[in-house]
């Protein structure tokens, strides 16, 4: 019997007190929420963590609220993910946020039995743990970790904790240096 396991880590994050103006990406209009000051304030009020957003982003960039989707501001919001696009609507980076301590991650395992043509889905919830692997990066009094994508792709993952909030940024368009510059703007 051959089994294939898939693990999907469901954790998402991001946002805060600065004013963010954004519009939906035309290619994603049905799946995301336009992020404007009104929606940002609603999300901040319902977030179970301190929302932090980059200030003074390039004015030609747009941002959309990828998660939670659909947005329900009548319920607590445990995590947020934002996507940033350049003026041509090309994806530049994503930022996720949630509580650094006391956040639960759901792991989904799919057990496929090819011989019997069956599948079993198991969801396990466990405490979030900061991944301390990667290169140590220091900026603005914060110690972060950087993990590159690979040798031919710029960027990677930059993660850190600030004000009790876990923040993870990913980009395959920006260099490590540029990602750190954006991270310095997160307040």
Image (cartoon, rainbow, N blue to C red):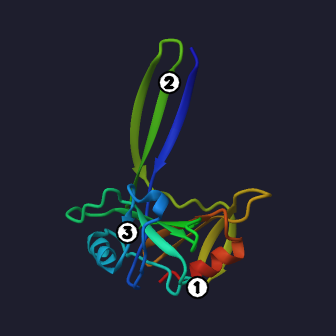
CA gap between label 3 and label 1 equals 32 Å
Q: Residue 168, image x and y in percent?
A: 53, 66
**In the current view of this chain or complex, which residue is farthest to the left?**
74
At x 38%, y 72%, the residue is 35
Q: Residue 8, image x and y in percent?
A: 49, 43
Task: Name the secondary structure under disc 2.
Answer: strand
At x 63%, y 68%, the residue is 145
Mark with earlier residue (1, 2): 2
Task: Name the secondary structure under disc 1.
Answer: loop
At x 53%, y 17%, the residue is 114
Q: Residue 182, image x and y in percent?
A: 59, 79
CA gap between label 1 and label 2 equals 46 Å
Q: Which residue is denoted by mark 1 in the rendering?
A: 141
At x 73%, y 64%, the residue is 154
> Could you say which disc has been placed on residue 6 in the image?
none
Q: Which residue is denoted by mark 3 in the rendering?
A: 34
Q: Nearer the viewer, mark 1 or mark 2?
A: 2
Q: Which residue is denoted by mark 2 in the rendering?
A: 112
CA gap between label 3 and label 2 equals 38 Å
């Amino acid at each position: 019997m051959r089994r294939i396991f898939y693990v999907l880590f469901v954790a998402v994050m991001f946002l805060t007190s600065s004013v963010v103006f954004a519009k939906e990406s035309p290619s994603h209009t049905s799946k995301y929420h336009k992020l404007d000051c009104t929606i940002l304030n609603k999300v901040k009020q319902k977030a179970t963590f301190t929302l932090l957003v980059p200030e003074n982003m390039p004015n030609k960039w747009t941002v959309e609220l990828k998660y939670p989707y659909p947005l329900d501001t009548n319920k607590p919001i445990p995590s947020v993910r934002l996507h940033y696009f350049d003026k041509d609507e090309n994806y530049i980076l994503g930022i996720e946020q949630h509580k650094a301590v006391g956040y639960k991650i759901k792991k989904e395992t799919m057990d496929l039995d090819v011989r019997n043509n069956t599948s079993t889905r198991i969801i396990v919830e466990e405490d979030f743990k900061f991944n301390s692997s990667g290169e140590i990066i220091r900026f603005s009094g914060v110690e972060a970790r950087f993990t590159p994508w690979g040798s031919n792709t710029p960027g990677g993952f930059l993660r850190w904790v600030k004000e009790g909030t876990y923040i993870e940024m990913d980009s395959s368009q920006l260099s490590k240096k540029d990602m750190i510059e954006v991270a310095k703007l997160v307040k």
